[in-house]
Amino acid sequence: MLLLALLLVLSASILGMWTQYSVKAKIAANQAIPNQAGLSGAEIAHMILRQAGLEEVEVARGESEGRDHYDPRSVRLELSPSVFDGRSVAALGIAAHEVGHALQHAEAYGGLTLRNLTVPGARLGNLLGMPLILLGLLFHNPIWAAVGLVFYLGVVVFQFITLPVEINASKRALVSLDNLNLLRTQEEADGATAVLNAAAMTYVAAALAGIATLIFYALSLFGGRRN
């Protein structure tokens, strides 16, 4: 069983690396394609927010790439420079996806509310989970390892709750873009869909890696005790 768990972890790791490569490749390809509306990601975000009556949401230019996110606490949407200023199909899709989270927040979407509730547990899990597991196994202390597993479970739960939230935000993005007639060609529609689907796959890979890692260390702990 331990060998099987190890194979699961390795498979999940390979899937994660392939997914990251795929996401970067799809975003890069669609960054080279200008959107027909000629709008920047920031302008697209403002259009969708205005249509939804959410003009109070701040749309800000972030300082680094790959940090696009919506903060429900400050009601602030932060877009990376290439998305905020970019006028590509990739910028169109990413900006619309992040606005999708603002729409979820405004509608009190249950999945987003639940994810926000699990954030503290995920942070503790990232901070304490793996160190306690490894220390417990290293010093043959099953209590430390078991506590570490509980903390790490918080990370896995967060990852699984995040997955449907991200998929829902992407669906909202495509609907919003279609309603505003911003997907004017089949190439744009296909490109935006490819970017959003590829991004969603990163969450699938993270969730699978999380559960595989949890199973591996659980078997390492309890399997060793049986022996």
Image: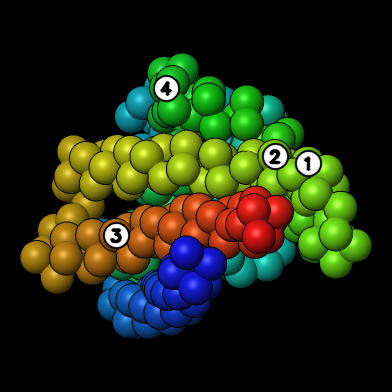
Nearer the N terminus, badge 3 or badge 2?
Answer: 2
Q: Which residue is mark 3?
A: 197
Label pair 2/1, CB-CB below 8 angstroms: yes
Residue 175, x across and y down, in percent: 21, 40
Q: Secondary structure at mark 4?
A: loop
Nearer the N terminus, badge 3 or badge 1?
Answer: 1
Nearer the N terminus, badge 4 or badge 1?
Answer: 4
Q: Using a 10 Å C-alpha cutoff, classify the residue at mark 3 as few (fewer than 14 neighbours), some (14 to 19) or many (20 or more).
A: some
Q: Residue furthest left?
A: 186
Q: Using a 10 Å C-alpha cutoff, classify the residue at mark 1 as few (fewer than 14 neighbours), some (14 to 19) or many (20 or more).
A: some
Q: Secondary structure at mark 1?
A: helix
Find the distance from the CA under tag 3 to the CA under tag 4: 21 Å
Residue 77, x across and y down, in percent: 58, 42
Q: Quadrant of residue 80?
A: bottom right
Q: Which residue is mark 1?
A: 147
**Residue kind at label 4, given as amino acid type:** Tyr
**Residue kind at label 3, given as amino acid type:** Asn
Please tell me which residue is depicted at 73% across the width and 34% down the height of the picture: 120
Q: Which residue is mark 2?
A: 150
Residue 105, x across and y down, in percent: 49, 25
Q: Quadrant of residue 64?
A: bottom right
Q: Which residue is mark 4?
A: 109
Q: Using a 10 Å C-alpha cutoff, classify the residue at mark 2 as few (fewer than 14 neighbours), some (14 to 19) or many (20 or more).
A: some
* Badge nearest the viewer, 3 or 2: 2
Please tell me which residue is depicted at 42% across the width and 45% down the height of the picture: 163
Q: Residue furthest front?
A: 227
